[in-house]
Every structure is written in structure tokens, then in C-alpha cells.
Image: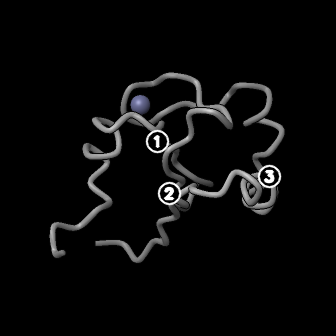
């Protein structure tokens, strides 16, 4: 497994900063960021997860299915 940091986008106030740091804030606000599972446009209202990657970041919407499919929650606990 790659050692990537997985962020749960729980705090909307932090999002603009996170997006800014990733250099994709404008893209995001222009609606060019899509859920990597279902492909729907990600907005501040439906963002579920941000998964930073080499190419920038991957996003998952807040649908339970998509979050489960993105497999970021271990079954350890
Ligand atoms: Zn989705």
C-alpha cells in the first residue's frame, strides 16, 4: 500500500485551506472535481473524502456507498 494521507473532510471550514494547499481550489469551485467512485461533481455540500495522491488528490462524495468502495476505512476496529 502507498503511504498516502487520507483526510476525512469533516470540517467544511478547513476545506478551502486544504484545497488551496493542494492547488485545486479553483478547479473545485468551478465544479471540475468529481467523485472517483460515482463521477458526480464534488462540492462543499457533498464532499466525503479527500485522498491526496501524487497527481493532486482524489475525491469521494459523501455517499456511503462511495466511501465504502473507496475502502479507506479499515475493518480493524
Ligand atoms: Zn460518489
The residue tagged 3 is 16
Compute the Cα span from label 2 to label 3: 15 Å
Q: Secondary structure at mark 2?
A: strand
Relative placement, left or right, of 27 versus 4 is right
Sequence-first tag of 1 and 3:
3
- Residues tagged 1 and 3 counted as in contact (Cβ below 8 A): no
Name which residue lies at 55% across and 30% down: 34
Measuring from the top left, give residue 23's x and y in whole percent.
79, 54
**In the displayed structure, does residue 12 sit left or right of residue 23?**
left
Q: Earlier in the sequence, mark 2 or mark 3?
A: 3
Determine whether, in the image, residue 49 is placed left or right of residue 2.
right
The residue positioned 45% from the left and 71% from the top of the image is: 4
| Quarter the N terminus occupies | bottom left
Which one is in front in this view, the residue at disc 2 or the one at disc 3? 3
Quadrant where the C terminus lies?
Answer: bottom left
SS assignment at label 3: helix
User: Gap between marks 1 and 2, in whole Å?
Assistant: 8 Å
Q: Position of residue 30 (x, y in %)?
A: 79, 26
Residue 75: give x, y in percent of width and height.
Answer: 16, 67
| Residue of label 1 | 60
Residue linked to disc 2: 51
CB of residue at label 1: within 8 Å of ligand 1?
A: yes
Residues at marks 1 and 2 touching, judged by CB atoms closer than 8 Å: yes
- Whether disc 3's CB lies below 8 Å from ligand 1 is answered no
Q: Residue at x 38, y 26 (%)?
A: 38
Amino acid at each position: 500500500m502507498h503511504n498516502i494521507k487520507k483526510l476525512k473532510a469533516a470540517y467544511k471550514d478547513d476545506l478551502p485551506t486544504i484545497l488551496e494547499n493542494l492547488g485545486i481550489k479553483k478547479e473545485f469551485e468551478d465544479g471540475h472535481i468529481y467523485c472517483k467512485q460515482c463521477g458526480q461533481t464534488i462540492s462543499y455540500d457533498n464532499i466525503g473524502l479527500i485522498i491526496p495522491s501524487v497527481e493532486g488528490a482524489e475525491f469521494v462524495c459523501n455517499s456511503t456507498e462511495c466511501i465504502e468502495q473507496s475502502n479507506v476505512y479499515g475493518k480493524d476496529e
